[in-house]
Image: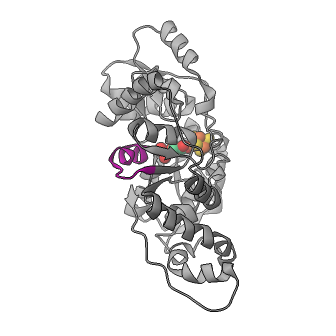
Amino acid sequence: MVAFAQPALAETSGAGSALSEAFARTAPLYERIRRVVPPADWAFFAEDAEAILRLKRERNAVILAHNYQTPEIFHCVADIVGDSLALAREAMRVDADVIVLAGVYFMAETAKLLNPGKTVLIPDAGAGCSLADSITAEDVRLMRQAHPGLPVIAYVNTSAAVKAEVDVCCTSGNAARIVKSFGVPKVIMLPDQYLAKNVAAETGIEIISWAGQCEVHERFTAEDVRELRAANPGVTVLVHPECPPEVVAEADFAGSTAAMADYVGQKRPPRVVLLTECSMSDNVAVHYPDIDFVRPCNLCPHMKKITLSNIRKALEGNLHEVTIEASVAERARASVERMLAL
Ligand code: 13P
Ligand code: SF4
């Protein structure tokens, strides 16, 4: 997790279009991302970025942004950035009246669970997740009945209603630790079948899962990795554990989005590919001009629903406030808090 200080913006005056004046005033912000965002794009972002910085001050708001958010959000208006685990942890410590979650709906719900008294906004309430959409609370109840006595762990990429039915949550950053914490040979971990297989291989614990998968990571193949290595000699391949196990087996390292960023920062591979969502490479590449970031990547259509424009509108109009029914919230919060305590 990284917390950013917001820079003072330049004062300008004189002729020119509103767009180019905003561009000039926000030059210090643009400087942060000029390696990965063309100036023509920033010309359209500048006014919204400026307005968002003002609105945050006026409304005592903070923006929590996931590692898959675009660089102009991640590096220019976010206060706190990180993986799902860091965003959940930091949501507990936030000292603000309003939290804007630049990420997908389950992340905003988690922030609300941990901040019942604060206003939590998501700029587009339709920013879902194929994993969260793959399972319902009723599905979890039926699984419990089918496997009585087994601990039930929900990936945070689930609805609050699903979290309310389980014993504890996990993220990709702590899944192995949470699975091992029960000290039993068999657990249920929902809903990502690939994460479950990868964690089972890592821990030696049998995991019963669900037929969910991430629509972004399921598309990477072992053949992709072999072709990348052939085309880019010496490349270090980092993958997310939502990838199929045969992809993880071909990689140099598998870890959460934060773990991938840390790996790059610590090991400084001269050439690297992050087999994950596209903005991740842009956001990490900003810090390491000396590293050659090889693409491909896959876009998450849900993460990409969040833009500077709808962040601004959410703050201006207090739009898309996240609410969770009290009886669900209480039990779901307990599952998230148990994870954070472990
Ligand atoms: P992380 O918890 O690793 O950031 O992953 C979240 C996610 O949605 C990955 O697809
Ligand atoms: Fe969900 Fe996959 Fe998008 Fe992450 S990348 S939010 S798991 S669909």
Residue 298 makes an appearance in the image: no
Observer-nearest of 210 and 300: 300
Q: Is residue 126 left or right of residue 163?
A: right
In this rendered view, identify the residue nearer to me: 183 or 2.
2
Q: Quadrant of residue 20?
A: bottom right
Would you place residue 335 above or below residue 97 in this image? above
Q: Residue at x 46, y 19 (%)?
A: 165
- Image quadrant holding the C terminus, namely top left
Position in image of residue 201 (x %, y %)? 45, 31
The residue at 57%/15% (across/down) is 138
Magenta segment boundaries in residue numbering: 85-98
Give the colouring mode of the picture: one colour
Q: Position of residue 25 (x, y in %)?
A: 55, 81
Q: Which secondary structure dominates the residues rendered in magenta?
A: helix
What is the x, y in percent for residue 4? 40, 65
- Identify the residue at image location x=50%, y=67%: 54
Q: Is residue 339 above or below residue 51?
A: above
Q: Is residue 97 magenta?
A: yes
Residue drawn 67% across the image and 91% down it: 15
What is the tally of numbered marks visible in this picture?
0
Q: Is residue 49 visible?
A: yes
Q: Position of residue 304 (x, y in %)?
A: 65, 52
Q: Is residue 311 left or right of residue 333?
A: right
Quarter residue 23 falls in: bottom right
Q: Is residue 331 magenta?
A: no
Where 101 falls versus 235 (above or below)? above
Q: Nearer the viewer, residue 193 or 129?
A: 129
